[in-house]
Amino acid sequence: MSDSLMATYNRLPISLQKGEGVWVWDTTGKKYLDALSGIAVCGLGHAHPAVKEAICKQAGELIHTSNLYQIELQQQLGDGLTRIAEMDRVFFCNSGAEANEAAIKLARLFGHKKGIENPTIVVMEQSFHGRTLATLSATGNRKVQAGFEPLVSGFIRVPYGDLEAIRTVAKNSHSTVAVLVEPVQGEGGINIPQEDYLNEIRAICDEYDWLIMLDEIQTGMGRSGRMFAYQHTGIHPDVITLAKGLGNGVPIGACLAKGKAAETFGPGNHGSTFGGNPLACAAALTVIRTLEDQGLTQRAEQLGAKLLTDFADKLQDVTGIEEIRGLGLLIGIELDRPCQALVTQALEQGLLINVTAEKVIRLLPPLIMSDEEADHLVNALTTLIKSFLKEQ
Ligand SMILES: *Cc1c(COP(=O)(O)O)cnc(C)c1O
């Protein structure tokens, strides 16, 4: 292997060459079922014909101009996204971390405009918001932060799911301007909060004039069984951040805002050279159209329910399984022990999965997966889990 790449990843020993739907092939011709979708990115699967056509066509016309000019496709995508997310305005960037950077800057500016000189944002334990300095400072995982101090200040951390802790911050801190929270924690281990969690945070934010900012980078674009996970609740957030599934692999991020939050940024407050360029917008417009036309959000809900039932069925008498949980196609199988080794064993069996938070097998399959492919996933993975637990 070449060592010209910085050693930021411990890479698995395969190189993928082509894909079709939920399947990918490596350079030796071996075939894998992709139950991870490039970490919740390729919701429409690989080599989706409509996405391919859209980006090929756009590449033949115009890939990039600049945000110094009007960009018609960006306007169209903005109209489409604000419609489906029920938000007012959007800023486009190129990744999840950048979308959260925009949200953090927006919250700080919102605070400054109210006369708060050192605004703070409430963030959660076990959260993940990205790898830039501000977003790693917001992230609730020491491994992501260690060695990169001094961290960006202005974050107050509370346990995920703990409403009382947020109320305590509200009573004691006059500098707080926002809460940044994932509707379901992805990297943290597919942690699903109690049902009224977001509603109660919304109520606190209303009472104290804070913004509720939802990191939907992993949960968004139909994956949770709603277009956005917050739509499982009755609330409207002030800010939503998106990336992963938005471009089906073409890099694009977005920070959406509603009401007073949507009026915070003015000219010169934020920007991006690449953000919202015609190529990325053509891809994202096709993703939205395909999700809607093919009812893939409903499909994610239905398929997610089937997978949860089938895993529960096949693993019911197996000791070593702590919990099987999920929302739509965000699925976690928590074991009673670290299980990173399962990733390599799955690879040998032709299955792409992920383990996060050490003990949680994380599945983020494409939304286009068929019932037969889902059955194959359940059979292959439950066999692997059983033998993994037995050999220990
Ligand atoms: C992946 C992810 C991010 C970071 O996105 P990048 O595109 O890697 O910068 C932020 N928040 C959540 C919830 C994520 O899952």
Image (tube, helix red, strand yellow):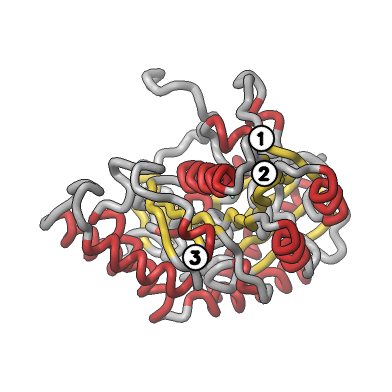
In the image: residue 180, left or right of residue 218 = right
Q: Quadrant of residue 108?
A: top right
Alpha-carbon span between mark 3 and mark 1: 30 Å
Q: Residue 299, position in %: x, y?
A: 54, 77
Q: Label 1 amino acid? A: Gly
Residue at 48% x, 60% y is 262
Residue depth check, mark 3 versus mark 2: number of the one nearer the observer: 2
Q: Residue 242, position in %: x, y?
A: 49, 56
Can you say whether 149 is above or below 171 in the image?
above
Q: Label 3 amino acid? A: Met
Q: Quadrant of residue 286?
A: bottom left
Mark 3 or mark 1: whose residue is earlier in sequence: 1
Q: Residue 138, position in %: x, y?
A: 64, 38
The residue where tag 3 is placed is: 221
How packed is label 2: few (under 14 Cα within 10 Å), some, or many (20 or more)?
many
Depth order, front residue of 180/58: 180
Mark 2 or mark 1: whose residue is earlier in sequence: 2
Residue 27 appearing in the image: yes
The quadrant in which the N terminus is found is top left
How packed is label 3: few (under 14 Cα within 10 Å), some, or many (20 or more)?
many
Q: Is mark 2 within 8 Å of ligand 1?
A: no
Q: Disc 1 on helix, strand or loop? A: loop
Q: Residue 50, position in %: x, y?
A: 28, 69
Depth order, front residue of 178/35: 178
The residue where tag 1 is placed is: 154
Residue at 73% x, 57% y is 208
Residue at 64% x, 58% y is 212
The residue where tag 2 is placed is: 121
In the image: residue 52, left or right of residue 95 = left
Is disc 3 in contact with disc 1, using a CB cutoff of under 8 Å? no
Alpha-carbon span between mark 3 and mark 2: 25 Å
